[in-house]
Image (cartoon, grey):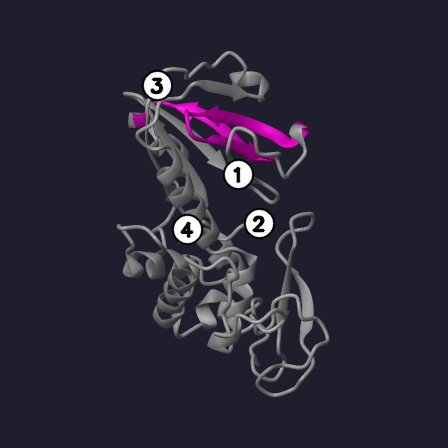
Amino acid sequence: MPEGDTVWRTARALDKALSGARITLSDFRVPTLATVDLRGQMVRATVSRGKHLLTRIGDDTTLHTHLGMEGAWHLYRAETRWRRPVDEARVVLRTPRWIAVGFALRTVEVVATNQEQSVVGHLGPDLLGDDWEPDEAVRRLSSDPGRTIGEALLDQRNLAGVGNLYLNELCFVAGIRPQAPVGSVTTLPHLVARAQTMLAANRDRRQQTTTGNTRRGLQHWVYRRTGEPCRRCGTPIETGGLGPAGQERTTWWCPACQPERG
């Protein structure tokens, strides 16, 4: 699933390409929105809220989308061939200069702009938002001390933008295991600050890195490195599941550098 920095970058690309232009064609390939027609309306802005995208159109219309696990927005010129299968397209917005295509989107909704809180109001402080509130993020994370820190970080109601990549990398740099209970983590303010720093550092990069090295295969400390030697101590990286049955997330950790078992 795309992380908050990827969604932030997607919002900026859509905003730059579409804002100020009138829609010449709108095609919603979602049954509940099949009759929606936005032709003639001007795109005012696209913003991100955690992992959610809000495209504001006309006087009071917002297109709310969420990429989910496999989704993406692409921008094409009129004669350019699409890079993903046509049957994966869920939304097509055309302006005089660009064609914006939302592929395999998990969520596609049209709401009144003054009702945006109905779709994003549940989110915690946005790590890349203008309203970022680290103290509030710490308060929310601390509210359930028995929960694992991994699950708490993934819960977008606590802080918005952390996905599985950053969950694992944050736990490594903090020296805790994803399975550790929140109540055992004594450095939550530092963890929250590091989360914001990581996402902010990567929001303008196509290749995310948490190690500071952008070379392929060297970008991450533990993420997807099962059995490989820890970059700090050489101990083989271990892996396991986290979360309720049927909704488990894969986690990785160094048993030497992350001694807490939870």
Tell me the element at label 4: loop
Amino acid type assigned to the residue bearing label 1 in the image = His
Mark 3 burial class by Cα count in 10 Å: few <14, some 14-19, many 20+: some
Tell me the element at label 3: loop
Tell me the element at label 1: strand
Residue 205 point in image, percent of width and height: 46, 60
Instruction: Give the distance between the C-alpha atoms of the residues marked 4 and 2, in whole angstroms.
Output: 14 Å
Residue bearing mark 2 = 1
- The boundaries of the magenta stretch are 87-113
Q: Quadrant of residue 233?
A: bottom right
- Please report contact status of discs 4 and 1: CB closer than 8 Å, yes or no: no
- Tell me which label, 4 or 2, sits earlier in the chain: 2
Q: Nearer the viewer, mark 2 or mark 1?
A: 1
Instruction: Give the distance between the C-alpha atoms of the residues marked 2 and 3, in whole angstroms.
Output: 31 Å
- Tell me which label, 4 or 1, sits earlier in the chain: 1
Query: Looking at this rendering, what residue extends furthest in the top direction?
Result: 35
Residue bearing mark 1 = 74
Residue bearing mark 4 = 160
The quarter of the rendered structure image containing the C terminus is bottom right
| Residue for point 50% across, 53% down | 3
Observer-nearest residue: 85 or 229?
A: 85
Specify whether residue 120 is in view.
no
Mark 4 burial class by Cα count in 10 Å: few <14, some 14-19, many 20+: many
